[in-house]
Each structure stands twice: as C-alpha cells, then as structure tokens.
Amino acid sequence: MISSADKTSPARVLHHPGISFSDRLEHDLGQALYEAAEPDKPMALVLVCLNSFNLFSRLYGGEAAARVLERLHEMLMRLGPKSMGRARLLALEADDPGSMVMMLQDGPELLTHLMERSLVLRAALRQHLNKEMIQITGQPLALSIGFARVEPAPAERLPELVYRALRDARQVAEGSLDLKSMNLLEEFRRLVEQPLLHSVYEPIVDLQSGQVKGWEALARGPADDYFHSPEVMFDFADEVGALFHLEKACLRQAVLGVGRLDSNQNLFLNINPETLADPKFRDGDFLWLLSRHGLRPQDIVFEITERHSIGDLGRFHRTLQHYRSQGFSLAIDDMGTGYSGLMRIALLRPEFLKVDMSLIRGIDSNPMQRALVETLVTFAEKVGGTLIAEGIETATEFSSLRGMGVRYGQGYYLARPASEKPRPKINRVDFPTGQGEAALHYNQCSFAVRNLVEQAPQVGPRATVREVKEVLDKAPISGCLVVDRALPLGLVMSHNLDRILGTPFGSSLYYDREVALVMDDQALIVDSGTPVQQVAEKAMARDKLKLYDHIVVTEEGRSMGVVSVQRMLDALAKVQVEMAKGVNPLTGLPGGVVLEQEIERRSASEDAASIIYVDLDHFKAYNDTYGFEAGDRMIRMLADLLQWSVRRHGNSGDLVGHVGGDDFVVATTPDKAERLCRAVVRCCTRLLPRFYGQEHRKAGQVEARGRDGKPGVFPLVSISLGIVDCPSSCSLLHVSQRAAEVKCYAKSRPGNVFVRDRRRSNP
C-alpha cells in the first residue's frame, strides 16, 4: 500500500479469498484507501478489471493467473501516474480477483479530463499486457476500466465518499453507468440529499358528492432541470441503483408539504413494492416522520403500480399485513396496463383500485371501454375495494363515469396538480344539484344544441389514415372531423378506426391511404339551432353500430364542432331533474311552485319574517346589446352575490330564490334584511359596470330598444331591492301586493337602491 505518509513506498496487493467486495471495503481495502485519502482535496479513483479472470485462472492455472496480476500491478505502478497526467498515486490496492483500484490526486485538471486519461491508461495497459497474454494463451485478454471522482470533504465523510466512488467506478467498468450518467450522478445526489425535489398534489374527488377523498403526491424535480420530470428521475435512480434513496426523499417531501388533511381524507404515496418490503424502510423512521407532522398511518395509502412485477407474492403479502396492522391502506395503480392479473389483485385485496387513463379517455363514446370499467366496478366491490378513475379530462368522461357508479376520480378536468393543494373545479358549483355545465341556457327541453358543442380536431380530405390516428391518439375527444373549407365531409370515431385497423391486414391496407376510405360520410349532421330533444331522437334512431358516434353540428353550413351522445343525454336528464325539483336551471336556485310555497309558509308563520324582492333595472337594454350569454352571466353573478350576502350577513335558514329572468327573492328576518340589502347594493355598485365595455362605462348609458320596441338611450344596469315585513302571519296576497308597490317605488329611484315598506302591516 502507498500511504499518504510515504508516497514512494511500493504498493502491495491484498488478497482476501472468500471475502465479498462490500465486506472487504469495510476492512482492508476500505481502510487502505481511507488512510491514503487526503481530506478536503479532490481525488480520482480508477478501477482496472481483467474480464473473465476467474475463467482464465481455472483454464490456465493459478501460476499463470498470479503472473498476469503481477504484470498488471507493475504496469499500473509504472504507467498509471504517467497516463493520468503525471498525477500522484496515493494508493494501489487489489479489489476482486482480477481487479485493482488506484487512488490519485492532482488537482482539477485530472478530474476535468478523468475519462480521457482513463481511456489512455486502458489503451496503454492493453498494449503492454496483451504481449504477455498472447505468449501465455495465444490470445488477448479483455480489459475494462472504470473511474469516479472523490469530491473534497472532511475526514469524517471520506469513508462514505470513497464507497460511492468505488461503486460508481464499478458500474462504469461494467457498462451499466455511461458517461452521461456519470456526469449527472453528482447532480442527482444533490437532488436527493439537499433535497431539491418537491411534491405537487392532485385531488381525488368523490364523483357522487364532489368532496375531496384524498390527495396523490407526485414528485417533481427543479424547474428547467434535467431531473424535473419524475420519469427521468426514477429511471435514472433505477439505472444507478439509488431507487430506494430517491423514494425515501420523495415520501419525506410529500409528507412535509401536504399540510393539514381534513377528516376522512388520505394522502396517496407512490412507492415501489421492493422499497415497501425493504427492511431499511420498516425501521420506524417513516412512522416517526408522520407523527412529527400530525399524520397517522390511517391517513396514508401506499400506491403501488401494476407496472412493477411482484416477484415473491407471499413475501409481499406478509409485508402488507405488517403495514395494515399499523393502519396503512393499499392502492393498485395503473390497472389494465401491467403484470398483475385480476386473481393476483384479488389476493392482495387493495382498498383502492385505480383504473389507468387509457381506459378512461373517450369512455363516453366507446362501448367496449364502458363495459370494461363497469366490470371493474363490480370486481372492486367483490374484493372489498373502491374504484378510482384516473385521467378524467372532459365533462362527458366525468358524467359517464359518475353514471356508471365509479366512486372516485382524478384528472385535469377536476384539477391540475399543484404545490398548494388545489381546490377541485367541481366544488365551485352546488354539487350535485348545482348549475354545472349542463344546466346553462335551458328553457325546459327546447334549448339549442349549440350550447353543448365541443371542439373536435379537424383534418382535410387528403389526410392519411396514419395522420388521423396520430391526431386521435393525442386529442382529448374521441372523434375527428373531415372538413373541406369548413364544410363537414365526414367523421372518424376512434373506436371505429381501431376496429378497422385491428382486422387482419388492416394497417397495411389503410394506414397510408386517404381518410375518405375509413370516414363515415353519412354521419348525423344537425344545425346549431336544432333543439336538443330533436337531436336526441335522431341520434337514438340510428343504427346500433353508430349509437355512440358523435353528432356533427354546423352553423350556416359550416362546421361548428361535435356533441357526444353522453353529453346530450346528461343535459336532458339534468333539465328534467331540475324541473322536477322546481329549481331554476340557470342558477340552481329554487323557483316556481317550490318558491311560492316557501314564501307562503314563511308569510303565514307566527315568526316575524322579511321578504326582499330583487330586480335589475334596464336589464333588457343590456341583454339586447351584449347578448343572452352575457345576460346569463350577469344573472348568475347576482345569484352568487345574493347567496354570499345571506351567508355573510343573514341566518342559517334564510332562503334565496329565483323567480325567473332578473327577478329574485330573499326570505330572512327583519333584523337582517337591511344589512343584507346594504351589502348587495355596495357590491353591485362596484361589479355591475364591469359587465360593460369601456365606451359604455364612460358614457354611462347604452342605445337600445325599450320594451315598447322603440329605440332609446338607457342607463347602465342597476339593482332595486324592496323589503316587505311580516311581523306575524300574513296572507300571500297581502305580501304580493305590498311587494309590487315597494318594488315599483324602488325602481323609480335612480341607481342602486333598497327601500323598506314602513307602512303598518295589515294581514
């Protein structure tokens, strides 16, 4: 051994038969390298391996093998420092039989050109050593070389860094760690150890109630970094044997960043089955981490992907029993894409089964996918688990899954992953009886189909089937329109195209031909103004093979988009439900008979009540100028504002109702009425002008036709509120008469106002 104290002493070769590499690292080899290493200085480690040396020793005997090793030692002593840029040789030690390790130190130049100098050394060794080999065996002996840096560090850290360098050099020599990986290794270690990675959280939503069931933690690397993508991170970790350390770092960051979980919510953590079964993971550190951050095992769901094979199922089953006894739950991820059959999943009895997005995308129009998912719903129930649909990206996918009984879901339609737990979009409406997409612009069942149109990808008539297939694979919708100058020529549905290409010789016959050969040139095409009820009847009358094909919608003959059958049926069902419940479909607020009965009940009650009648002034002029869609937005804003005011200033039992159009009613108590009205007036003064363009806001008026049909100039929309009090039981007729009078008086005053009927109440 050449020690740091005696740089000129001859190196000695250490032989330890029967002792493994890792064991010997902790003894003679490791001790020799540690003693030679110089703290706080950069060093290089070079590993030279004679390939198939054990076989050579058995074939040609121990004497020949010893002779070759002696020659290798001599050459490394003579050629090593010279080939490595005249670096100082700190130590030369034997590794496994047929391998030797050099530790060198010569400042930054050696480290900068470590690969080049190592290759020069290998070439020199081959040239000189193979002369000897050819004399002994008649043929050369293959030789490989590995190398690694030992970063400057204090003495107490040198053992760890030397071990890493030995491992890295061995991987380079074996070819399992290429140059690019070598350059990235230190960056990857900083990523894990500092750590530089973080977690984002994607909500898992109850599709039946809209409540958040849990959050899936997803690892992300630094922005604009090679390791930003989790796929790159985990593939690299697997390549360099650091998967366990990366997963522990990801789990730690997921727990640190999730914050407080509501009652009955879970944190879903992705983990490799091998990591879960590793004794080092079961040492109690993770339980301590959870406890420190206010979490319990009952809050955690370990999510293992079906893409990872579980080699020893019995061992893994025992591992699961260990974690389940502590309170942890299990989810099987990516069902339908991996190794596990249904029987294996049934034996594991996971609490959650996550269906891969490949079975979810386009499920609204693909009967086969629907049948598969419906089967999985039943299967999950039989094995005591609950289904979670991944990758929900459209409203029709969401409504289809909900209608099929899928309990939970996640995907971009609900919310995108974010560092701060994102609020699902589904919670922004009064779910499940709120206004939602399918509740807008309805007038009983005669609303126009244009309100349901979705944009579909389009191709020209000369496009090839290959191009259409690529478009459909990337599109969020399962249909592609074939158009010529905006005129629809036909429709290609993804499930029909897959059926055609899946036939014998289908790909070879059609792939590079024009799309006209596979498109449906008799697709159902309707005008955008056609009532949805009529479109539904036409769609249901089609051949059963076309039953789930999209409907093409045009406006003045030009393509506008498509409507899926599922979206259309969901809309009709929504209207019927809302009508049956007496709920105004535009705002989701009670109206009609339900509202009338509620006002009558409160008026006749012995308890004091106040009824506030709300009306927008000059709304018709705005609606005619900016259109019905803008008018609907203003009405929905007013509905939200009234509900906010009741929550903020009213009582828990107060009622907000929508009579129709721009007329609303609020039922509250006399002590709250004026405070409610004052809040609404204050907000409307600020919000209503924002619905106008800059020109109209500046002018303070618009030109439009009045209710008499004559043109005129009208002020901007304002709000009028009239309060009618019922100190004791009043008749509905009395309340209605007073309401008409007080509302008329309020509307006679300019601007945003509220008035209160202070006349003595006569029942």
Image (cartoon, rainbow, N blue to C red):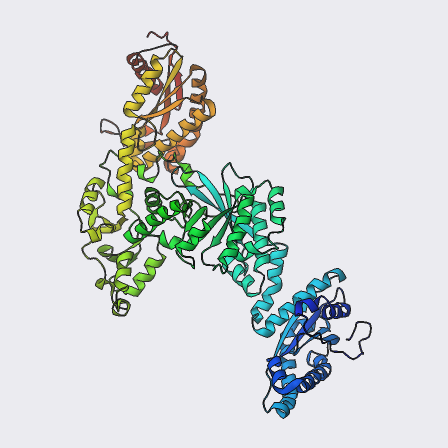
Is residue 244 depicted above or below 162 in this figure?
above
Which residue is drawn at the image coordinates 40% and 40% (left, top)? 426
Which quarter of the rendering shows the N terminus?
bottom right
Percent coordinates x, y for residue 263 in the rendering: 51, 36
Residue 480 is situated, as x and y percent measured from the top left of the image, at 28, 56
Please state which of residues 316 and 306 is positioned toward the viewer in this rendering: 316
| Figure check: 315 above or below 577 | below
Q: Residue at x 58, y 73 (%)?
A: 174
Which quadrant is home to the C terminus? top left
Left or right, 383 with reference to 248? left
Q: Nearer the viewer, residue 534 or 329?
A: 329
Q: Identify the residue shown where x is 49% and y is 45%.
A: 215
**Left or right of residue 459: residue 380:** right
Q: Position of residue 163 (x, y in %)?
A: 68, 66
Report which quarter residue 492 is drawn in: bottom left
Q: Is residue 303 visible?
A: yes
Q: Position of residue 175 (x, y in %)?
A: 56, 73
Q: Considering only vertical position in the picture, is 80 above or below 138?
A: above
Q: Is residue 562 left or right of residue 688?
A: left
Determine the residue located farthest toward the right in the rendered image: 5
Kindly indicate the quadrant of the structure image that contains residue 107. bottom right
- Would residue 463 be visible to someone looking at this image? no
Q: Is residue 9 above or below residue 465?
A: below
Q: How many marks?
A: 0
